[in-house]
Amino acid sequence: MAANSPPRMVTVPGGRITLSDRRRLRSWDVDLAPFDIAVTPTTQAEYAAVVGEWPGETRGGLLPVDSVTWGEAIRYCNLLSERTDVAPAYRIDGEEVLLDDSSTGYRLPTEAEWEHACRAETIGARYGSLDAIAWYRDNSQEHSHEVGGKLPNGWGLHDTLGNVWEWCWDLLDPATYGTYRVLRGGGWFDEQWSCRASVRRGSHPTLRIEDVGFRVARGRAVAPPAGAASRDEDTPY
């Protein structure tokens, strides 16, 4: 991607998605406006074109970028907005990051947006046969693969499951995990049960992990209601 070229994106229709927390026996609905989301995770070439760096130990322009912190993903979004003449979605003040939810700048998807986009109106654990749609431990040879090599979901999105986990905007569970942010989708080192539409994981926003990347979104963000419980990884789908 040239420095001023936007990533390839699709528009996801708005709707309502139900998120669940089996551990607390709680579920809640999130209403979503239409939004745009990248067809693939951000690649190493895309990241380098904007940031000027190649993080991680692997090298390959079409490989998903990995080993980026949540904060670095946020900064990439702002830089991408600036380079494509869009007002940035985030205001960064030291360690504090504020989202302008009316902005159309590039940003990380919310957790609800991510799951809504991943499911593409399906209701099962995943939108197709895992070997056909995802790189995971049984077929990845324990490394990442070029994006777009597996079948897309019904809305044309590749690699929402497997290849790399993806940072989302949301806090994982502030009461229990403090500033940890949500990761979604499973990665190349994960067993099949981690590559499901509902599985969530979290990490400290300053950590770099070799199977963690991100994809960008645009459009008005609609957050879940205040105080909504976090989802436990026991959720079957």
Image (spheres, rainbow, N blue to C red):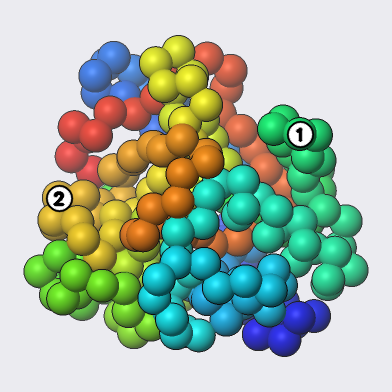
Which one is nearer the viewer's eye here, 111 or 169? 169
Q: Position of residue 216 (x, y in %)?
A: 60, 61
Residue, x 70% and y 53% (percent of image)?
75
Q: Secondary structure at mark 2?
A: helix
Q: Estimate the x, y position of residue 26 in percent, counting from the top left.
A: 33, 18
Number of dots carrying numbers: 2
- For the N terminus, the image quarter is bottom right
- Picture layout, residue 161 above or below residue 16: below
Q: Residue at x 52, y 67 (%)?
A: 55
Q: Which mark is residue 193?
A: 2
Residue 125: tell me if it is visible. no
Residue under the image location 34 percent in, 39 percent down: 201
Residues packed near mark 1 inside 10 Å, few (<14), some (14 to 19) or many (20 plus): few
Which residue type does callout 1 highlight?
A: Gly
Dot 2 alpha-carbon crowd within 10 angstroms: few under 14, some 14 to 19, many 20 or more: few
Q: Is residue 202 above or below residue 229?
A: below
Indicate which disc, 2 or 1, sits on the residue closer to the N terminus.
1
When the figure is inspected, residue 117 is found, relative to residue 25, above or below; the finding is below
Distance between the alpha carbons at the discs numbered 2 and 1? 37 Å
Disc 1 target residue: 94
Secondary structure beneath label 1? loop
Q: Which of label 2 and label 1 is nearer to you?
A: 1
From the viewer's side, name the closer residue of 204 and 155.
Answer: 204
Q: Of residues 65 and 31, which is closer to you in this image? A: 65
